[in-house]
Image (cartoon, rainbow, N blue to C red):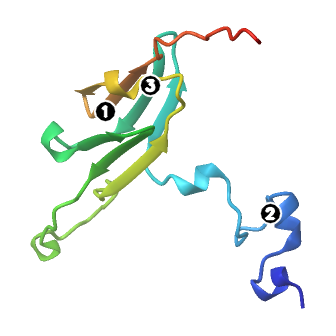
Amino acid sequence: MTQLQRWAIDPFDIVWKNLFDVNSQFSSIENKINYPVDIYETKEGLRFELAVVGLDKEDLDIQTDGDTLRIKHDKEAIDEVEHLYIQRGIAKRSFDLAWKVASKFDLNKLDAILDKGLLIIDIPYSATKAKQIKIK
């Protein structure tokens, strides 16, 4: 018995993601982030957009540590007995998201805005220029 068989990992998954196997040990990044987030690069730098409808800026915790950006929200426990839901479609859940940000972006100068239920975080490009090294 090989190591892969003992761990119940299909060797096919190691070389190539089996797109038809929903129980695969290796999933794409789309399956890992379960919160509505858009991340894209602009002319000025990197932009994160998170849907945080119903949250105030006091409900959100944004931290940087080295090259990591972390955005958290801890949902307060509400009494479910109070509400008799007829339709429940708004996801009111806690989240703790973190990304490693490339060194070409300056996390120390990030700017965060909460606008109409959308948390927008802009991270500008780093001002460091490439340095030419002379060989001695």
Q: Nearer the viewer, mark 3 or mark 1?
A: 3
Considering only vertical position in the picture, is 122 above or below 79? above
Indicate which disc residue 119 carries.
1
* Crowding near the residue tagged with mark 1, few <14, some 14–19, many ≥20 C-alpha atoms within 10 Å: many
First reached walking from the N terminus: tag 3 or tag 1 = 3
Residue, x 40% and y 50% (percent of image)? 97
Q: Residue at x 38, y 37 (%)?
A: 50
Please state, as top left, top right, bottom left or bottom right, where the N terminus lies in the image: bottom right
Marks 1 and 2, the one that precedes in the sequence: 2
Q: Dots 3 and 1: beta carbons under 8 Å?
A: no
Q: Residues within 10 Å of mark 2 (few under 14, many from 20)?
A: few
Instruction: Give the residue type at disc 1.
Output: Leu
Q: Earlier in the sequence, mark 3 or mark 2?
A: 2
The residues bearing labels 1 and 2 have C-alpha atoms spaced at a distance of: 35 Å
For residue 27, side relative to residue 109 (left or right): right
* Distance from Cα at disc 3 to Cα at disc 1: 10 Å
Q: Secondary structure at mark 1?
A: strand
Residue type at tag 3: Arg
The image's mark for residue 20 is: 2
Quadrant in which residue 53 is drawn = top left
Answer with left or right where residue 91 lies relative to residue 103: left
Nearer to me, 132 or 14: 132
Disc nearest the viewer among 3 and 2: 3
Q: Secondary structure at mark 3?
A: strand
Distance in Å between CA atoms under marks 3 and 2: 32 Å
Residue at the spot of label 3: 47
Query: Residue drawn at (33%, 26%), measured in percent from left and top?
Result: 108
In the picture as drawn, the residue positioned furthest to the bottom comes out as 1
In the rendering, at what x and y percent does residue 34 appear? 47, 54
